[in-house]
């Protein structure tokens, strides 16, 4: 299977690297030549346009920062759609708007190709080792064609239903992670002001009912001071905004979500769109003149679990043939 990959940012470069490491024939494209160079050095072909990527590939993957950028990459005169052939697959691995991925999917289908949305979750450190989780929306036949490729990039792969369903669920999970991040910021600052040892605070949360994936990853980077989570403030603003839009679309009187949208928009105004999202803790640190820091925590996250072949996760109560 020949694979094209467009968008070699913090996550995309690692997903593409997993595919190249697993022996897939790769064509890659990014606006930043330095992002292309390591993959080209490993044997990937460096394309000059999205259309060329599609023309050289059986499957085209996009992993881009926003719905608007994805639309431009697909719909331009030299875009992905112009290069698709009957039987190709387009897989959108960006975190995006479900309505937009459905709209673009219809254009892909009109070319005789099959669309899927396949966003990932688990952090850049797990993308680097092929241990990230993947949510996949689309028809079952296309999912089964894609499964070997998805299993080369991720450990747990869930078929969520029709096209767009994976994007809805991904936005929901990112909303929960963002809410947890802010709650942890409040908890850590409160512990510091109350005179608690922050190393002990970390462990108290870790061994208690307050523990979470976000705590075991992002709290460590907050306490180290690097805050280097490889995920920016503007991406959180996009994600929580998409969640709020889903709530608005269905007339849900969300209460926490608007607060979270305001908190991260304020963080982006104060510290810039490219600041690491974990530095949202600075809203509290700066107002109180304190820092939540503790010795012994890592400056970056490393996935120490071995890379293993990915597998499909089957929801409870469902039996796959």
Image (cartoon, rainbow, N blue to C red):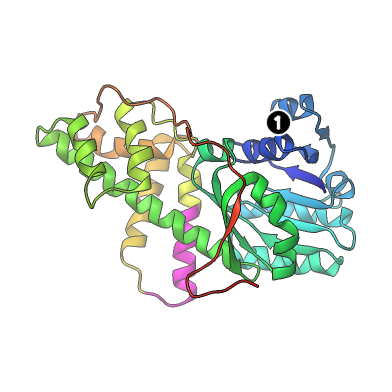
Q: Which residues lie in the magenta part?
A: 239-252
Task: Please state if 252 lies on the left or on the right of 159 as rendered.
Answer: left
- Please give the name of the residue rendered at 58% of the width and 35% of the height, measured from the top-left corner: 128
The residue where tag 1 is placed is 32
- Please give the name of the residue rendered at 70% of the width and 68% of the height, measured from the top-left corner: 103
Asked whether residue 131 appears in the rendered view, the answer is yes
Task: Please state if 62 lies on the left or on the right of 295 as rendered.
Answer: right
242 drawn magenta: yes
Q: Classify mark 1: residues with Cα within 10 Å, few (<14), some (14-19) or many (20+).
A: few
Residue 257 falls in which quadrant of the image? bottom left
Does residue 309 sit above or below 162 in this rendering? above
Residue 319 falls in which quadrant of the image? bottom right
Front-lying residue, 162 or 230: 162
Q: Position of residue 243 (x, y in %)?
A: 46, 62
Pick the quarter of the image with the C terminus.
Answer: bottom right
Q: Secondary structure at mark 1?
A: loop
Does residue 67 sit above or below 37 in this rendering? below
Task: Please state if 130 lies on the left or on the right of 177 as rendered.
Answer: right
- Please give the name of the residue rendered at 82% of the width and 51% of the height, measured from the top-left corner: 79
Residue 271 falls in which quadrant of the image? top left
49 drawn magenta: no
- Please give the name of the residue rendered at 55% of the width and 43% of the height, measured from the top-left corner: 131
Does residue 316 sit above or below 136 in this rendering? below
Does residue 108 sit above or below 153 in this rendering? below
Front-lying residue, 84 or 122: 122
Q: Position of residue 100 (x, y in %)?
A: 65, 64
Kindly report the secondary structure that dominates the magenta region of the rendered protein: helix
């Amino acid at each position: 299977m020949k694979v094209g990959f467009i968008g070699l940012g913090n996550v995309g470069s690692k997903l593409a690297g997993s595919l190249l490491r697993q022996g897939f024939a790769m064509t890659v494209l990014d606006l930043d030549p330095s992002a292309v160079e390591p993959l080209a050095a490993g044997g990937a072909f460096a394309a000059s346009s999205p259309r060329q990527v599609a023309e050289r590939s059986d499957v085209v993957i996009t992993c881009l920062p926003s719905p608007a950028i994805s639309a431009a990459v697909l719909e331009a005169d030299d875009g992905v759609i112009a290069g698709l052939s009957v039987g190709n697959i387009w897989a959108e691995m960006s975190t995006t708007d479900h309505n937009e991925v459905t709209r673009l999917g219809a254009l892909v289908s009109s070319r005789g190709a099959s669309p899927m949305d396949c966003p990932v979750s688990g952090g850049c450190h797990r993308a680097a080792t092929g241990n990230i989780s993947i949510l996949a929306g689309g028809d079952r036949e296309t999912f089964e064609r894609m499964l070997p490729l998805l299993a080369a990039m991720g450990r747990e792969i869930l078929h969520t239903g029709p096209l767009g369903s994976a994007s809805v669920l991904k936005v929901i999970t990112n909303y929960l992670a963002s809410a947890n991040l802010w709650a942890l910021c409040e908890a850590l600052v409160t512990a510091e002001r109350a005179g608690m040892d922050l190393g002990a605070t970390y462990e108290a949360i870790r061994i208690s009912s307050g523990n979470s994936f976000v705590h075991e990853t992002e709290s460590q980077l907050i306490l180290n001071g690097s805050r280097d989570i490889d995920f920016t403030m503007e991406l959180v603003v996009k994600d929580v905004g998409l969640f709020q839009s889903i709530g608005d679309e269905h007339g849900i009187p969300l209460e926490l979500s608007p607060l979270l949208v305001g908190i991260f928009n304020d963080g982006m105004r104060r510290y810039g769109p490219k600041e690491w999202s974990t530095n949202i803790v600075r809203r509290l640190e700066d107002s109180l003149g304190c820092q939540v820091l503790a010795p012994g925590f890592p400056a970056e996250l490393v996935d120490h679990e071995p890379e293993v072949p990915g597998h499909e996760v089957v929801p409870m109560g469902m039996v796959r043939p």
